[in-house]
Every structure is written in structure tokens, then in C-alpha cells.
Image: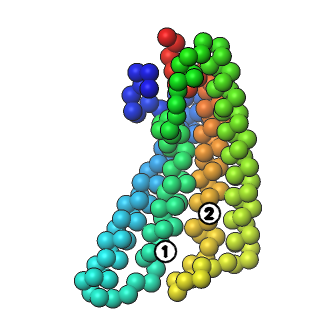
């Protein structure tokens, strides 16, 4: 990755908006990690009840599924902040800085447009589940607006991070694709 360390994060400089978004993304990362820990703990409890106490479980499997999916969605912005998403930088490395800058603007612009659609439809879907009082068809019968809230929140946080990345790029606080001149 062209001399980058694994912990390379988006730069925020002294820009308050960029610092706020970086803080929100970091908080989302911590919340996501806590959800994974909770899912592991619930899985261990479920195994104990099933195989040691020979009992049945009602809510554990569903809760673990919802927690892992929510952790994935809520953690999107943190991974983007750390530049942890899979990328191939062969083309940006081969381009001169001006073309690399334009390519970064194009990819971030397209990413913002796609995620804006996900945010819109995510909030719309969540609202339908809340308004209609949908529940899962399991014994637990969880109100689905609760786990589905992770969809619009996760994509809204990702959108904020993409906007911050775009702003950092146009203000020359961050480099295109995080790559230095070579």
C-alpha cells in the first residue's frame, strides 16, 4: 500500500467538521466492537444453556444475528475513516498527481451518491417497519424497527465520513487515496 501503515486514518487537520466526523466514526467503531463482544457473550451463554443445562433458547440466535449485522453496518464509517476497506491502488499509483486527484474526486462523488440513496431508502424502510409495528415471526417477536435502525444509522454515518473525506480532499488536508507524491 505504498508505504502506508495499517493504522492510516483520514486526516482532519484543524477543521472542526472533519474532527467531529472523525470522532463520530471512532465512536461508531467502539459501539460496533461492543456489539461483537455482546454477540460472542450471548453465543457462549446460548451454548451453556443448550449443551450444559439441556435447555432451549428463545432469543439468543436472533439477537446474535441482529448484533453482528448491526455491528457491520455501524462500523462502516470507522473502517472508512481508517481506510480499511479493500482497495486496489494500482491505477492511482500509476497516475500523475493531477489525474489522481480527479479520480479521487470522481470515486468519492460516486460513493456519496450511492450511499445517499442507501440512506434515503434505509430511513424509508425503517419508518415503514416502525409505523406498521412489524415484528419478527419468532417466539421472541422482536419489534423489527429496533434492529433495522442500524441500516439508516450505519449508512448515515458512512455518508458523513465520505463527505468529510471529500471535504478533506478539496481543502488539501488529505491526499488523493491517502497516497503521497512519488
Query: Residue at position x 53%, y 60% from top?
Result: 70
Q: Is residue 6 visible?
A: yes
Q: Is residue 53 left or right of residue 87?
A: left
Give the number of the disc on residue 11. none
Label 2's element?
A: loop
Query: Residue at position x 57%, y 67% from top?
Result: 147
Per the model, the C-alpha gap separating discs 1 and 2 is 15 Å
Viewer-proximal residue among 72 and 133: 72
Crowd band around label 1 with a 10 angstrom C-alpha radius: few (<14), some (14–19), many (20+):
some
Indicate whether 8 appears above or below 74.
above
Q: How many marks?
A: 2
Q: Is residue 171 visible?
A: no
Across and down, in percent, residue 11 comes to 52, 28
Q: What colouring method underlies this structural image? A: rainbow
**Quadrant location of the N terminus?**
top left
Query: Residue at position x 49%, y 74% from top?
Result: 62
Q: Is residue 53 left or right of residue 59?
A: left
Give the number of the disc on residue 149. 2
Across and down, in percent, residue 172 comes to 61, 19
Q: Looking at the image, is mark 1 or mark 2 earlier in the sequence?
A: 1
Across and down, in percent, residue 124 comes to 75, 61
Query: Residue at position x 52%, y 61% from top?
Result: 69
Across and down, in percent, residue 170 comes to 67, 23
Label 1's element?
A: helix
Crowd band around label 2 with a 10 angstrom C-alpha radius: few (<14), some (14–19), many (20+):
many
Q: Is residue 105 left or right of residue 141?
A: right
Q: Which residue is mark 1?
A: 62
Viewer-proximal residue among 114 and 156: 114
In front of the other: label 1 or label 2?
Answer: 1
Indicate whether 132 appears above or below 151.
below
Amino acid at each position: 500500500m505504498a508505504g502506508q501503515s495499517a493504522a492510516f486514518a483520514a486526516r482532519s487537520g484543524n477543521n472542526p467538521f472533519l474532527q467531529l466526523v472523525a470522532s463520530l466514526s471512532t465512536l461508531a467503531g467502539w459501539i460496533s466492537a461492543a456489539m461483537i463482544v455482546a454477540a460472542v457473550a450471548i453465543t457462549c451463554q446460548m451454548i451453556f444453556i443448550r449443551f450444559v443445562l439441556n435447555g432451549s433458547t428463545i432469543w439468543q440466535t436472533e439477537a446474535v444475528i441482529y448484533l453482528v449485522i448491526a455491528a457491520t453496518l455501524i462500523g462502516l464509517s470507522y473502517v472508512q475513516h481508517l481506510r480499511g476497506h479493500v482497495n486496489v491502488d494500482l491505477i492511482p499509483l500509476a497516475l500523475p498527481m493531477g489525474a489522481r486527484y480527479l479520480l479521487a474526486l470522481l470515486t468519492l462523488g460516486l460513493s456519496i451518491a450511492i450511499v445517499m440513496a442507501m440512506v434515503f431508502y434505509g430511513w424509508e424502510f425503517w419508518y415503514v417497519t416502525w409505523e406498521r409495528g412489524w415484528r419478527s415471526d419468532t417466539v421472541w417477536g422482536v419489534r423489527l424497527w429496533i434492529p433495522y435502525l442500524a441500516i439508516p444509522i450505519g449508512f448515515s454515518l458512512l455518508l458523513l465520513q465520505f463527505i468529510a473525506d471529500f471535504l478533506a480532499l478539496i481543502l488539501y488536508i488529505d491526499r488523493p487515496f491517502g497516497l503521497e507524491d512519488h
